[in-house]
């Protein structure tokens, strides 16, 4: 399941939705906004995306991870809009019969998101915004 949304998400509800069938492991990664960057206080981040392309890319990653690893279900939720320090940004959660493929799939997905998905972040420090450079950074 893929979701791109402005509102926060419930880590507990996402995890609960993965505990179906013959599940022996649920592995998740939750990314949150850091309070400091380069030693300077961050006031907020703003995320933008090209929604259709981002959803397509996330679905392809989900399909690829299911094919490559012995996992059952995958939920990827990414927020867009303005997000403040300590708030949730992204959650990747994977269920599997065994822990090792769940860990592998979760790591694979978050690494691929950072490289390929057209979601960009603008970091605000002392009232000034700057696009954060990354492998898929906005010019």
Image (cartoon, rainbow, N blue to C red):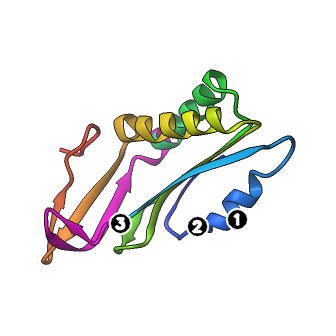
Residue 126 location (% of width, % of height): 12, 77
Residue 120 location (% of width, % of height): 31, 51
Residue 110 location (% of width, % of height): 46, 42
Q: Measuring 39% from the left and 51% from the top, which residue is drawn there? A: 49
C-alpha separation, residue under disc 3 versus residue under disc 2: 14 Å
Write down the residue under mark 2. 9
Q: Quadrant of residue 117?
A: top left
Dominant secondary-structure state across the stretch colored magenta: strand
Residue 76 visible in image = no
Q: Measuring 53% from the left and 70% from the top, which residue is drawn there? A: 7
C-alpha separation, residue under disc 3 versus residue under disc 1: 21 Å
C-alpha separation, residue under disc 1 versus residue under disc 2: 8 Å
Name which of mark 3 and mark 1 comes first in the sequence.
1
Write down the residue under mark 1. 13
Task: State whether residue 127 is above or below residue 73.
Answer: below
Q: Secondary structure at mark 1?
A: helix
Q: Secondary structure at mark 3?
A: loop
The stretch drawn in magenta includes residue 45: yes
Write down the residue under mark 3. 33
What residue range appears in magenta? 34-53
Within 10 Å of the Cα at label 3, are there few (<14), some (14-19), or many (20+) other Cα atoms?
some
Residue 90 location (% of width, % of height): 48, 56
Left or right side of 99 for 92: left
Q: Do the CB atoms of the residues marked 1 and 2 lie less than 8 Å apart? A: yes
Name which of mark 3 and mark 2 comes first in the sequence.
2
């Amino acid at each position: 399941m893929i979701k791109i949304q402005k509102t926060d998400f419930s880590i507990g509800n996402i995890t609960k939705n993965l505990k179906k069938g013959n599940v022996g492991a649920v592995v998740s990664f939750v990314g949150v906004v850091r309070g400091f960057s380069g030693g300077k206080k961050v006031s907020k981040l703003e995320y933008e995306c090209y929604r259709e392309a981002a959803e397509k890319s996330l679905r392809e990653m989900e399909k690829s991870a299911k094919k490559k690893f012995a996992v059952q279900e995958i939920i990827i939720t990414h927020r867009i809009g303005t997000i403040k320090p300590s708030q949730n940004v992204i959650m990747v959660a994977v269920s599997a019969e065994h822990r090792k493929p769940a860990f592998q799939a979760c790591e694979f997905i978050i690494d691929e998101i950072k490289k390929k998905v057209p979601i960009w972040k603008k970091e605000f420090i002392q009232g000034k915004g700057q696009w954060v450079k990354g492998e898929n950074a906005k010019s």
